[in-house]
Structure formats: C-alpha cells, structure tokens
Image (tube, grey):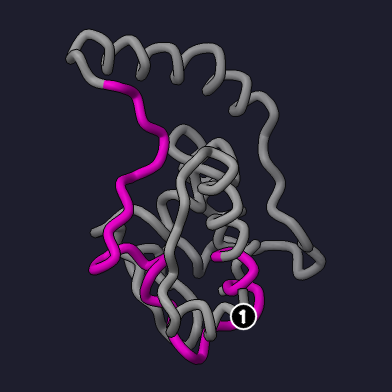
Amino acid sequence: MKFEHTLQFMMDFYAELFPTRKHCLNHLFCTIGNGYEWENGELVDHDHDELLKRWTISPDLERAQENKNRINFYINCTLPRMKLMAERLHEKYEFWYPLDKDYSHLFHDPADMQDDWREGVKECIECLRLDGIEVDMGEESAMIMKL
C-alpha cells in the first residue's frame, strides 16, 4: 500500500492513537514490535488484511488528511493527561519511541524501498531532528536513502 494511504488508514481507523502524521511516523518507523514488516519495499501489517478488503481510498489522495477535531482533542485532553501521568511517575514525557538501531524500521530500510516510503522515512528523520533528536543512519542506509 502506498505510504500516504497507510497513514490515512491509521488516522481513519485508529484516530485516538494516530491523530497526526507525526504519530504515524513514530509508530511505523521508530516503535519496535509494531506488527509492520518491510515487504516489497513497503511497510506492511497483515493483521489489517481483512479490514483493508472493505476499505477503499481515493486513488487521487496525494497527502493523508489529519482530522482537526482529533488533533484538538489530543492537544487539549490526551497530551495533558499523558504529561501528568509521566509527572506522577517521576518521569519525563517523551513523544518519540526510543530509537533502536537493531530493531526500529527506520534503520532497516530495504534496498527495494518504494520512493514514497523513502520520502516517509526522510519526513520522519526531519521530524526527529526538529524535535532535537539526531539520527545517524549509517553509511549503508544513507546510500539507500540518498540523504
């Protein structure tokens, strides 16, 4: 499935978990054990195969659309609760899943990666950098990514 279609699927069916592109990027490329695997140059989760048979998306979709109501709910309700919970546990709230070079999909990009997925990885790296997290992709990944 195309990268933008995957993001739209995540935001449509799991809006509470993925209210924004950034949430989707974090889950797809940083979170280990997320159920997705590289297959034919795309990240695929076969747990959704039955649901995908009943879901159609506009072939004209160029960029996944975030739902502004879900974003507002996240900013005004979910995020403050998450920060409060972290504070009560004497921990710092961290948005990004801790990167793991051995397991995060971000570091295991296949040579046959589809161009739209390559752009998704680049977007994730840029979001990480904007949030103050430097990403060392290593020589092999950098060549595949053409960074």
The residue located at (59%, 46%) in the rendering is: 21
Q: Height in image: 87 above or below 106?
A: above
Name the secondary structure under disc 1: loop
Q: Taking 44 as reference, is 3 left or right? A: right
For badge 1, the amino acid type reads Lys
Residue extending furthest right?
A: 60
Q: Residue furthest left?
A: 89
Residue occupying image coordinates x 55% and y 44%: 22
Does residue 49 sit above or below 21 in this rendering? below
**Membership of 18 in magenta stretch:** no
Which of 115/137 is in front?
137
Q: Quadrant of residue 147?
A: bottom right
Residue 56, image x, y percentages? 64, 63
Q: Tell me where residue 127 appears, x and y as whole percent.
A: 58, 47
Q: Position of residue 124 (x, y in %)?
A: 55, 55
* 2, above or below 57, in the image: below
**Near-viewer residue (103 or 142):** 142
Disc 1 marks which residue?
146
Along the line of sight, which residue is nearer the eye, 72 or 142?
142
Q: Is residue 56 left or right of residue 24?
A: right
Relative image position of residue 11 (x, y in whole percent) = 56, 45
Provide the residue span drawn in magenta. Answer: 92-121
Q: Say how many tags the image has.
A: 1
Q: Quadrant of the N terminus?
A: bottom right
Q: Overall secondary structure of the magenta stretch?
A: loop
Mark 1 Cα within 10 Å, few/some/many (few <14, many 20+)? few
| Residue 95 within the segment the image draws in magenta | yes
